[in-house]
C-alpha cells in the first residue's frame, strides 16, 4: 500500500514492523486492509474518492455524497466477476454446463441489491446477448446439419430444442430484468455509522478535508445584506427541499455563476432568508425552480410553493420542477434507489392534490417505500443537472410535458441522470 504523503510503497511486513506507519516518512496509515474486515480498501482508495468527488479540491461536497461514492466504488469490487469468468471458460469446454451457469451468474448480478445500477444494467444486456446468440446458433445448427439415415436426427432435434429453450429463457430474463431495474432497491455495502468512523479517523490523521461541508449552520454565512443591494431583485430562484442541498449549491457559487438566488423550503440561509425572499416578491416576472428528492416529502415541494401564502400563493410567478420526480427514476436504470417503511407510510399520507399530479405507477413506486436522494449525485453532476434544467426551461413550451436531459456524455462515467422542466405557472 502506498503512503499518500510520500508515495512510498509499504508491504504488510513494512507496515507491521513500523506500527502502521510509512517506513519512509512515518506517516500513519488510516486503513489496514488485512484487519479491517469487509469491505477492504486502502488509504489511496479513500484519498482518490475525495479527490474525484471534489474534482481535485475545486468543489465542495457533503459527507453523504462521499458515502454514496465510496459505496459505489466498493461495489465494483464485489460483483461476482470471478463466477462469470469461470462460467465463460466452462462454456467453451462444456457448453451444456457452462452456458446455464453463465446465465445464472448474469441473472444473479442483475438482481443483486449489492450491485451498482450500471453493472446490473450491463448484465441484463449480457443475458439478452446470450439468448440471442443461442437462438441464432440453434436455428443455424438445425438447418445447417445434414441429416443421414443413421438415426441421429432425434439427437440433432434434441440439441436444437435445448438450445432454443435455454436461449429463450436467457432472452426473457434479460428483458424482464431490464424493465425491473428502475424498481430494484439497492443497499449500502457498509453502515453509515462505520463510514462516519472512517471519515472521523481520516481527518484525525490527515487533517480536515477542506471541501467537506459541515452540517448547515448560519454562523458561516453573512447575517446582513447591504441596503443598496436590497432595492434590486432576482429574476430566478432555486428552492431546495433541504438546507443541505441549498448549502451545497451556495458553497459551490452556483448563485453567482447562474445569477439567481438559492433558498431552502426550511428557511436556509437563516441570516438573509427573509431579506432575499422579500427581494424575490418584488419581481412579478420571477422564475422559480424547485429542486428536491424523489420522495414523498420531495414531491410536496411544488404544492407548498404554489399554495402557501408564505411563498407564492398570491403570485403569478412561473414555477418549474427540476426534479427529482418518481417518473425520472422509472425512466432510468442507473439511480441508487432506497426503500424504508417510513417512506412508504409518508407516501400513503400524501394529499389528494399531490396525488393528482402523479401517475398510478409513480404512486405505486412511492407507496412501496422507494426514494432517491439528490445527494446520491456527485456535486459536479448535480450542478450540471440544475444548470441544464434552468437552461432547458428557457426553451420549454410549458405545460405538463417533461423535458428530459441526458447529462452523461462521457461513456466512462458510471451513471446517467435525468432532469425535467415542468411548468406550473
Image (cartoon, helix red, strand yellow):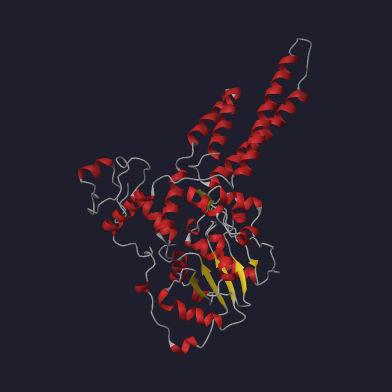
Give me the residue at 44% from left, 46% from top: 188
Q: Position of residue 206 (x, y in %)?
A: 29, 58
Which residue sits at x=59%, y=66%? 303
Q: Is residue 42 left or right of residue 333?
A: left
Identify which residue, 392 or 421, lies in the foreground.
Answer: 421
Asked if residue 405 lies left or right of residue 70, the reply is right
Q: Is residue 168 left or right of residue 340?
A: right
Task: From this view, report whether residue 393 is shown above or below residue 346.
Answer: below
> Is residue 386 shown to the viewer in this render?
no
User: Extreme top residue here?
Assistant: 150
Residue 330 at x, y percent in the picture: 61, 51
Where does the image place residue 320, in percent across and percent down from the top left? Answer: 61, 68
Q: Is residue 318 above or below residue 330?
A: below
Q: Position of residue 416 (x, y in %)?
A: 57, 54
Q: Is residue 291 above or below residue 39?
A: below
Picture residue at 49% right of the left edge, 48% below the top: 341
* Residue at left offset 53%, top offset 71%: 238
In terms of image quadrants, where is residue 218?
A: bottom left
Looking at the image, residue 347 sits to the left or right of residue 72; the answer is right
Q: Nearer the viewer, residue 207 or 366?
A: 366
Amino acid at each position: 500500500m502506498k503512503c499518500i504523503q510520500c508515495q512510498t510503497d509499504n508491504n504488510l511486513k513494512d507496515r507491521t514492523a513500523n506500527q502502521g506507519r510509512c517506513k519512509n516518512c512515518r506517516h500513519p496509515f488510516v486503513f489496514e486492509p488485512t484487519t479491517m474486515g469487509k469491505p477492504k480498501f486502502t488509504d489511496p482508495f479513500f484519498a482518490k474518492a475525495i479527490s474525484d468527488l471534489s474534482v481535485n479540491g475545486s468543489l465542495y461536497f457533503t459527507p453523504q455524497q462521499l458515502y454514496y461514492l465510496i459505496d459505489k466504488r466498493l461495489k465494483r469490487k464485489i460483483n461476482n466477476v470471478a463466477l462469470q469468468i469461470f462460467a465463460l471458460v466452462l462454456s467453451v469446454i462444456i457448453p451444456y454446463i457452462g452456458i446455464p451457469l453463465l446465465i445464472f451468474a448474469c441473472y444473479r448480478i442483475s438482481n443483486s441489491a449489492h450491485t451498482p445500477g450500471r453493472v446490473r444494467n450491463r448484465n441484463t444486456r449480457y443475458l439478452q446477448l446470450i439468448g440471442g446468440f443461442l437462438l441464432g446458433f440453434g436455428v443455424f445448427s438445425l438447418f445447417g446439419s445434414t441429416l443421414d439415415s443413421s438415426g441421429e436426427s432425434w439427437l440433432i432435434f434434441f440439441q436444437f430444442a435445448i438450445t432454443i429453450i435455454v436461449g429463450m429463457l436467457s432472452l426473457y430474463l434479460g428483458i424482464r430484468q431490464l424493465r425491473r431495474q428502475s424498481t430494484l432497491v439497492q443497499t449500502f455495502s457498509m453502515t453509515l455509522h462505520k463510514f462516519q468512523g472512517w471519515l472521523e479517523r481520516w481527518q484525525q490523521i490527515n487533517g480536515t478535508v477542506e471541501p467537506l461541508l459541515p452540517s448547515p449552520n448560519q454562523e458561516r454565512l453573512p447575517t446582513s445584506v447591504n441596503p443598496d443591494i436590497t432595492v434590486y431583485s432576482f429574476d430566478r430562484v432555486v428552492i431546495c427541499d433541504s438546507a443541505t442541498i441549498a448549502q451545497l449549491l451556495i458553497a459551490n457559487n452556483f448563485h453567482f455563476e447562474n445569477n439567481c438566488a438559492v433558498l431552502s423550503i426550511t428557511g436556509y440561509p437563516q441570516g438573509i432568508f427573509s431579506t432575499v425572499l422579500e427581494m424575490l416578491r418584488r419581481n412579478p416576472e420571477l422564475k422559480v425552480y424547485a429542486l428536491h428528492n424523489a420522495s414523498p416529502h420531495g414531491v410536496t415541494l411544488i404544492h407548498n410553493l404554489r399554495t402557501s401564502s408564505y411563498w407564492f400563493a398570491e403570485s403569478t410567478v412561473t414555477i418549474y420542477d427540476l426534479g427529482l420526480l418518481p417518473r425520472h427514476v422509472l425512466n432510468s436504470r442507473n439511480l441508487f434507489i432506497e426503500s424504508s417503511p417510513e417512506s412508504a407510510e409518508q407516501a400513503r399520507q400524501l394529499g389528494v392534490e399531490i396525488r393528482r399530479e402523479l401517475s398510478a405507477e409513480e404512486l405505486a413506486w412511492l407507496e412501496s417505500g422507494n426514494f432517491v436522494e439528490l445527494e446520491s449525485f456527485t456535486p459536479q453532476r448535480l450542478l450540471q443537472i440544475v444548470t441544464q434544467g434552468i437552461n432547458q426551461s428557457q426553451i420549454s413550451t410549458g405545460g405538463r410535458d417533461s423535458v428530459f436531459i441526458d447529462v452523461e456524455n462521457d461513456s466512462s462515467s458510471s451513471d446517467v441522470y435525468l432532469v425535467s422542466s415542468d411548468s406550473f405557472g
